[in-house]
Image: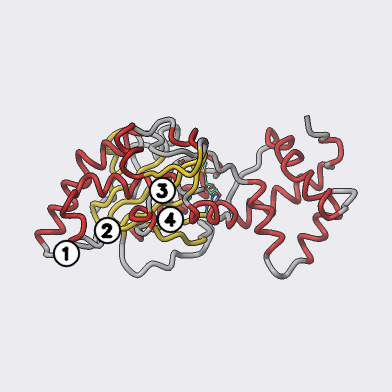
Amino acid sequence: MPDDSRLTESEFLAIRTLVYDRFGINLTDQKRNLVVGRLQKVLRIHHFSTFGEYLDFLNADTSGEALSDLIDRISTNHTFFFREPEHFRFMTAVALPLLSRTLAERHERDLRIWSAGCSSGEEPYSIVMTLQMFFGHAYKQWTAGVLATDISAHVLRHAARGIYPLERLAKTPADIRARYFEPVDADTIRVKPEVQADVTFRRLNFMSESFPFKKPFHIIFCRNVMIYFDAPTRAALMKKFYDVLAPGGYLLIGHSESLGRDSVYFDYVQPAVYQRKP
Ligand SMILES: C[S@@+](CC[C@H](N)C(=O)[O-])C[C@H]1O[C@@H](n2cnc3c(N)ncnc32)[C@H](O)[C@@H]1O
């Protein structure tokens, strides 16, 4: 159990304000123990005896590395392959048939998907596998791919390697395991290169003023990220997603999250699935 007596009220407030202002993450009072638990190690590494010294170090750092390390430690990165399978069924049964038909009618073959808050990569790789299974032999005729972004440099490094402990595949159907993964050793498995090749990983902070994309996306996955944000931060993010989605494009959020049914920017389709208004 972390010793939270070492973190004073004003130090907690300073960390909380910094994390909120820079990353949008809302560290409520209940997260106090989590903050102590996750930052204790960094105090040890730098031989700081108080959180005050750590805050001075954070404020003096101009390289951005200390802040990057802070977010790596604070953010929750839990994820696994084919999490919330209803979304992958929706892609196959509804979104991909509709989007591919509409694009093909316009003689376009460029289907763009964004995994926003991709963590260690299980989500974007699951999306590519779903695309490859849906299109089959025709997949080569599409420039379909997934942009996968996260704030944490640490998870992105893991994601790019594409190597995972077997337990991350607990919810992955056996045929998909056999087709898209290869064993590394008894406990570890690797995503096949043809899946890896279609995911581009980039670091991106949702708090950026605007997103640097030239072309709109057809589907955005932003799942189990907004639970860490408060209502104003979520509302600002919705507007930014609206701006980078093609009309009629889909926004998929976590099943424990909600946009409500009267969003200005999105129509409700089914639980955790929304469609951009025209
Ligand atoms: C719980 S994971 C969700 C992973 C995956 N989408 C899923 O549903 O399994 C949440 C991710 O959001 C990222 N995140 C949190 N705040 C962020 C921000 N301000 N900008 C970008 N990513 C952020 C975290 O680093 C973390 O990897």
Q: Which residue is depicted at the point 35% across and 43% down?
A: 252
Q: Which residue does the numbered mark 1 point to in the structure image?
A: 108
Q: Of the residues under marks 1 and 4, which one precedes in the sequence?
A: 1
Neighbor class of circle 1 (other Cα within 10 Å; few <14, some 14-19, many 20+) is few
Q: Which residue does the numbered mark 3 point to in the structure image?
A: 191
Neighbor class of circle 4 (other Cα within 10 Å; few <14, some 14-19, many 20+) is many
Between 109 and 171, the residue placed more toward the observer is 171
- Image location (x, y in percent) of residue 238: 41, 51
Q: Which residue does the numbered mark 2 point to in the structure image?
A: 144
Residue mark closest to the camera, 2 vs 1: 2
Between 27 and 178, the residue placed more toward the observer is 178
Q: Secondary structure at mark 3?
A: strand
Q: CA–CA distance between discs 1 and 4?
A: 22 Å
Q: Which residue does the numbered mark 4 point to in the structure image?
A: 148
Q: Up-down: is 57 above or below 125?
A: below
Q: Up-down: is 170 above or below 211?
A: above
Q: Of the residues under marks 3 and 4, which one precedes in the sequence?
A: 4
